[in-house]
Image (cartoon, rainbow, N blue to C red):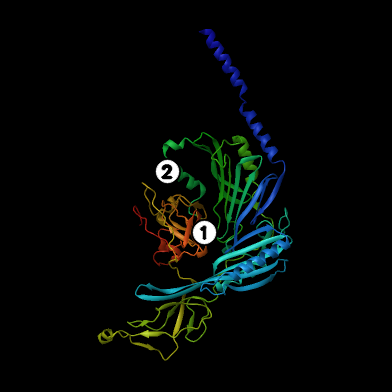
């Protein structure tokens, strides 16, 4: 027995001797990081720079400025000209909304001072009009939208800019934006301040309310399980909760049976190059016992400063197409690589003048206009006539477009009993021009889409609640964060569909409800000439939180009832 114990002790001693000590593991981690970061390259993303390993494969996408989706790519001049010709022919061959041949309304050549040239197209006009009740009044509304796009090229670089359902009166924003474009040589950094999208730079001045957005995704061929994600979004309202507070509340809701799988290595504020942010580093044991590491640094941002946007940078290990795999880097090496890269994030060192937010509405609320004159500003106008039982045909408040002739109000007098018997409605026009007062700059009236949108559903066996603004701290998402179809909505509020061609736009969902798929119209020819073919299809989409709100009538400070596609799911609402 003593001999057996002695042999077992000797074997254990030998086994322990084969395991490297902590100093050796740390040294190996430092050596691995030094090898990976021996050669670095600087990448320009928006208004920021970040240093990545030279081997990193970089993708920039999701660029958006002033409501236009922007993409930049290399292309020869011959390929570009052929693509522009094909696009123009396609738009001319597409029938307009009435089935005619006026789909393409504007085809305009573009030649900017910076060398970009190409064409701009305005097409696909949509018109929605009708009446809606507003209390006891009936409002008449009409709004129009157009698709606007531009294809430009310079020095082997092509830039496509596009927006669906854009305001017709603001189409001139696009050529003005193209004038700010300057090409950037491959691998070079812009020399002027502005918003960089890789192969091009939008030169200042730009304002925060033009909504700069861009996403960087990077991968390392030598470590395919590692992925980097950088998201920048300027001009959005800071979230009520930061990263650490959201994480703390998420942990408190986690079942005890799951908590052992999560180990926090870091959870504290971290300032990097003058940017005040918060850092979270975790080690997770996946269901297949794979150890993976997650790194997250976030800046909540400001609404009116493009140099302090909402910024989120992540590094994740253990990723693969077939599910989680063990991290290819040790804890020490992963932390070393993270620190090397995240600490390089900084504002691009160029001259940047502060640009105040500008209200584009040139005509102030309360402006008066009289019948017969041209409307000075698109919006909702209040008729100065009527009241005391006298109604106005079309409603006391009417939407009138800029440039249209202000109407003379037709006043509907109270009906007598004899009028009602005869089915008559007495009316009269004033001898004096009707006065109108601008009361709302909103360019459009919300309306129900032509096809039904997918509803958010209540998960089986789960409660769905509405987080009131008083309880906004309980929301499990920050403004600007993303979720996707089929996942529980992290916070009650307004979520924007990230599919630009979807009908959904921005919709309100209750916290806990399952986010729906996006809805798309289908051309009749897709399913042959059958009159019974589906008019729409639905598919998965990403959703982005734009505003936390108790209920759909809290957006923009007005109350207009339900939005398109909204359905009450409030079995356990706790509204104060």
Q: Is 387 left or right of 493, judged from the image as shown?
A: left
Q: In front: 346, or 435? A: 435
Q: In front: 162, or 387? A: 162
Q: Is 525 left or right of 200, judged from the image as shown?
A: left
Q: CA distance from mark 1 to mark 2?
A: 26 Å
Identify the residue at the far bottom of this view.
Answer: 431
In terms of secondary structure, where does tag 1 sit? loop
Q: Position of residue 341 (x, y in %)?
A: 64, 45
Identify the residue at the far front of this view.
Answer: 529
Location of residue 319 with respect to 86 vertically, above or below: above
Q: Is 418 left or right of 21, judged from the image as shown?
A: left
The numbered dot on residue 79 is none
In terms of secondary structure, where does tag 2 sit? loop
Location of residue 90 with respect to 494 vertically, above or below: below
Reading the chain from its start, which is encountered first: label 1 or label 2? 1
Disc 1: CA contacts within 10 A as few (<14), some (14-19) or many (>=20): some
Q: Is 311 left or right of 56, judged from the image as shown?
A: left
Q: Position of residue 433 (x, y in %)?
A: 45, 88
Report if residue 440 is visible in the image: no
Q: Which residue is mark 1?
A: 237
Labels 1 & 2 near each other (Cβ < 8 A): no
Q: Which residue is mark 2?
A: 253
Q: Position of residue 288 (x, y in %)?
A: 51, 35
Q: Looking at the rendering, in which quadrant would you find the C terminus?
A: bottom left
Identified at 52% across, 64% down, the residue is 525
Q: In front: 183, or 131? A: 131
Q: Position of residue 41 (x, y in %)?
A: 70, 48
Report if residue 213 is visible in the image: yes
Q: How many marks?
A: 2
Q: Nearer the viewer, mark 1 or mark 2?
A: 2
Q: Which picture quadrant has residue 171?
A: bottom right
């Amino acid at each position: 027995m003593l001999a057996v114990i002695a042999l077992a002790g000797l074997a254990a001693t030998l086994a322990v001797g084969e395991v490297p000590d902590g100093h050796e593991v740390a040294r190996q981690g430092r050596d691995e990081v030094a090898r990976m970061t021996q050669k670095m390259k600087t990448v320009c993303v928006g208004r920021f720079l970040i240093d990545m390993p030279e081997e990193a494969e970089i993708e920039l996408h999701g660029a958006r400025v002033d409501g236009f989706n922007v993409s930049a790519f290399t292309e020869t001049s011959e390929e570009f000209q052929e693509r522009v010709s094909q696009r123009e022919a396609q738009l001319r061959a597409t029938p307009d909304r009435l089935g005619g041949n006026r789909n393409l309304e504007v085809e305009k050549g573009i030649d900017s001072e910076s060398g970009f040239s190409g064409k701009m197209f305005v097409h696909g006009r949509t018109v929605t009009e009708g009446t809606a009740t507003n209390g006891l009044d009936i409002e008449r509304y009409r709004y129009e939208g157009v698709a606007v796009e531009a294809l430009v090229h310079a020095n082997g670089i092509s830039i496509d800019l596009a927006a669906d359902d854009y305001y017709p009166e603001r189409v001139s924003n696009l050529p003005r934006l193209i004038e700010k474009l300057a090409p950037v040589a491959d691998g070079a950094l812009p020399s002027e301040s502005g918003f960089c999208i890789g192969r091009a730079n939008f030169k200042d001045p730009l304002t925060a309310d033009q909504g700069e957005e861009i996403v960087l995704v990077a991968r390392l061929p030598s470590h395919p399980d590692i992925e980097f994600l950088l998201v920048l979004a300027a001009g959005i309202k800071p979230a009520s909760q930061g990263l650490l507070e959201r994480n703390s509340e998420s942990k408190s809701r986690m079942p005890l049976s799951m908590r052992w799988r999560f180990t926090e290595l870091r959870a504290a504020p971290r300032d990097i190059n003058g940017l005040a942010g918060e850092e979270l580093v975790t080690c997770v044991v996946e269901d297949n016992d794979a150890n993976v590491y997650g790194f997250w640094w976030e800046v909540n941002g400001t609404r009116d400063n493009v140099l302090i946007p909402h910024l989120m940078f992540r590094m994740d290990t253990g990723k693969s197409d077939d599910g989680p795999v063990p991290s290819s880097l040790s804890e020490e090496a992963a932390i070393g690589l993270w620190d090397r890269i995240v600490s390089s994030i900084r504002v691009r060192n160029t001259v940047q003048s502060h640009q105040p937010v500008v209200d584009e509405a040139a005509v102030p609320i309360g402006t008066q206009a009289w019948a017969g004159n041209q409307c000075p500003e698109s919006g909702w106008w209040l008729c100065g006539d009527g009241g005391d039982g006298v109604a106005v045909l079309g409603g006391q408040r009417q939407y009138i477009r800029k440039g249209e002739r202000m109407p003379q109000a037709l006043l509907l007098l109270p009906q007598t009993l004899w009028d009602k018997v005869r089915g008559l409605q007495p009316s009269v026009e004033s001898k004096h021009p009707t006065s109108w007062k601008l009361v709302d700059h909103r360019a459009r009236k919300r309306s129900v889409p032509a096809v039904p949108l997918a509803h958010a559903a209540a998960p089986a066996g789960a409660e769905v609640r509405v987080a009131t603004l008083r309880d906004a701290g309980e929301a499990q998402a920050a403004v600007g964060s993303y979720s996707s179809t089929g996942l529980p909505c992290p916070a009650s509020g307004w979520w924007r569909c990230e599919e630009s061609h979807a009908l959904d736009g921005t919709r309100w969902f209750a916290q806990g409800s399952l986010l729906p798929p996006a809805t798309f119209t289908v051309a009749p020819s897709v399913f042959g000439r059958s009159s019974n073919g589906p008019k729409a299809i639905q598919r998965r989409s990403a959703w982005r939180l734009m505003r936390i709100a108790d209920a759909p009538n809290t957006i923009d400070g007005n109350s207009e009832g339900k939005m398109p596609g909204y359905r009450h799911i409030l079995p356990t609402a706790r509204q104060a």
